[in-house]
Amino acid sequence: MLRRTFIALAASAAAIMAAGAPAFAQDVIRLGASAPKSGPLAGGAAVTHWPNIQLWMKEVNDAGGLKVGDKQMKLELIEYDDKTNGEEAIKNIQRLATVDKVDFIVTPYSTGLNIATAPIIARYGYPHITTSAATDGVTEFAKRWPNSFWMLGTSSQLANGVVQALTKLKDAGAIGNKVALVNVADAFGLELVGAAKPAITAAGFEIVYESSYPLGTQDLAPVISGAKAAAPDAFVAFSYPGDTFALTEQAQVQGLEVGAFYTGVGTAFPAFAGRFKEAANGILGIGGVNSEDEAVKAYLAKHQEVTGATPDYWASATTYAGLQVLGQAIEKAGSLDKAAVVEAIRTGTFDTIIGQISMPENVNRNVWTVGQWDNGIFKAVAADGLPVAGDPVKKPAWQ
Amino acid sequence: MMGLTSQETKGLGLGALLIAIAALLPLFDDGFYLSISVNIVLYAALCTSWALFSGPTHYVSLATAAFYGLGTYSVGLGIEVLPYPLLLAIAAGVGAIMAGLVGAATLRISGVYFVIFTFGLAELVRQLVTWTQTKFSTAMGLYVFTEMTESHIYWMLLALTGVVFLTSFLIARSRLGFAMTVIGNDETVARHVGIDTARSKIILFMISGAFIAIAGAITAPRYIYIEPPSAFNPMISFLVVIMALLGGTKRLWGPLVGVIPFTIVMDFISSNFPNHTMIVVGLAFLAIVYLIPHGVTGLLEDMQARWKKRAAPVVEEKPA
């Protein structure tokens, strides 16, 4: 009986596969994508990464495809799950490059997976436009892999953004000069806190409380009570999604009243506003978009309409913009030649939803760095080289 | 000293031949097939190292990720200052020391307690490494930039697998191996006949841990960016156990016949059902447990026995 059930299952699986095999067509650009669909980063990728690929491809295909030379070519996607695992990611890229022989490869998701796959992508000469990697190594990476482009900014930029926002609040008289500084003890948190500390002191703030906690810590109550005891005017945490939610929750429960409350990755997720509702108002976090900009407004509306979900207010827009750069560069190059497209990206200026982008040294320097929740929208309040949606405001008391 | 039987000589020769053939692979393909082969050889090395200890003792260890991560971190922390081969040796040393300490503390507990402890160990080591890095190291992210290509990593892992096999083979023939067989069958009896069970188990655990750490150290240049979640990924521990049990741990080559089909089936599933991988993997697990309960080795031995039975009567029933 069991045996027969499994045979039936296997047969139906085979049937699904046969039906799903893509039709071979000459006038199609084949894109490959490998990113988490399972594993620790699957949740993030499901919000930030995959929907934007879906949205962009639909837009391009509805418009008749990309104009390559004198041909209109539609897009076709081959997608793999990297299981949030470097070994899998490398294998997937190899499969895309040597078995599927795709024309272009969409960036993997997260700093670690982008760096792990960079040498393989470079070896096959594909343009590699990263939109979810934020680290200070970008200049070095761009030199090492000339086909790679880095669009999400650097840790120093993100850390300096926090100082910019705090300084504005202090100058406006909204907060005093006492800062509590907390970070998750992994590469991301260390890099940001390393860049932020000297900048905070240089801007005339006093660090009254400092603490770090290991990645995956469940109970962050001691961190918040420690910070509360130091009576800071501003609370800054370079945190990851799990801890971002936990810290905010604890601050609310314990009534940590500060004029500026900043948390790291995850603050920009729509789920954050969904979880904290009214209490989210005034919370600062990493990322943000210029929600006053028409292109961004149109993007947010289309994302909701096509994918049925709200994008996150940080890397989502960058991910979409990265795909726009790829599409426009293919049209500029007028061919599917990878080297020509890489050259087109390096030398061109691209009109994207996050503004005009040019990457002469393979790095995009114009990024939003800090956002603030304002009635369901995470508005950019600090940026490098880009207009913001407004100035940061003092956080109201917890509700 | 050796006194090999002809079957053992044949086995060794066959093993050497297979490794030699496998070593030629990068000459034919340096794309996808090399990549998947690297994964296969990596897990072959890990599973064989794991079975080295867990096979004879029946102690299911979930500490693979702890040793693997230690190896990866040894290279990540030291690559800027020390030559790579030395780092491999350091990784082996660190793995062995960790296994020794853990073994001394825990090998007196057994059954499910040991399983849970070893699972917790990976998390503990991860936190210790992160803490040490935060307190004492100025390096922010750890990068391992080398000139090594996938072919080099493949060859190194293949060599490691060969060494693990040879070690297992030699241990099985030694006093230690004999002691392990007795312990695996009945620990009380082993103690009564004068075997220092704790010492034997610790030594074997150290050898196993050292090999797993070396595998991690060899793979570090492939990750380039070393971070705790990938180095101490608990999935590694689980996959190793699943693959080794699929193959069967009674034979030296058991884990190997688990690793190869498992990796290929997993790859087939994840490339054909990218959106439903976990569901299909779950079904595949159920199928494996129901259809091949004794592992691939059991299946092969069954088939061999059936073939012999079928072959025998034919000889007898010759027409007169």
Image (cartoon, coloured by chain):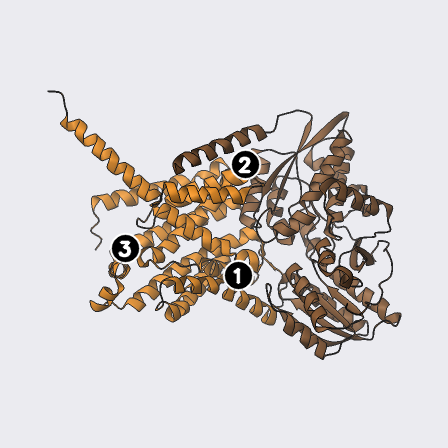
Which image quadrant for residue A31? top right
Query: Which residue occupies the foreground of this view, A68 or B265?
Result: B265
Q: Is residue A176 above or below residue B313?
A: below
Tag 3 and tag 2, C-beta contact below 8 Å: no
Identify the hue of chain B: orange
Chain label for disc 1 = B
Q: Residues within 10 Å of mark 1 (few under 14, many from 20)?
A: many
User: In the rendered image, which residue does mark 1 sit on?
Assistant: B73
Chain label for disc 3 = B
> Along the polypeptide, which appears first: circle 3 or circle 2?
3
Q: Could you tell me which secondary element the residue under label 1 belongs to?
A: helix
Q: Quick check: can you spot residue A67? A: yes
Q: Quick check: can you spot residue B23? A: no
Q: Is residue B26 above or below residue B65?
A: above
The amino acid on which the numbered mark 1 sits, given as a three-letter code, is Tyr
Tag 2 and tag 1, C-beta contact below 8 Å: no
Looking at the image, is mark 2 or mark 1 nearer the viewer?
A: 2
The brown chain is A
| Residue furthest right as drawn | A172
The amino acid on which the numbered mark 2 sits, given as a three-letter code, is Asn
Q: Quadrant of the C terminus of chain A?
A: bottom right
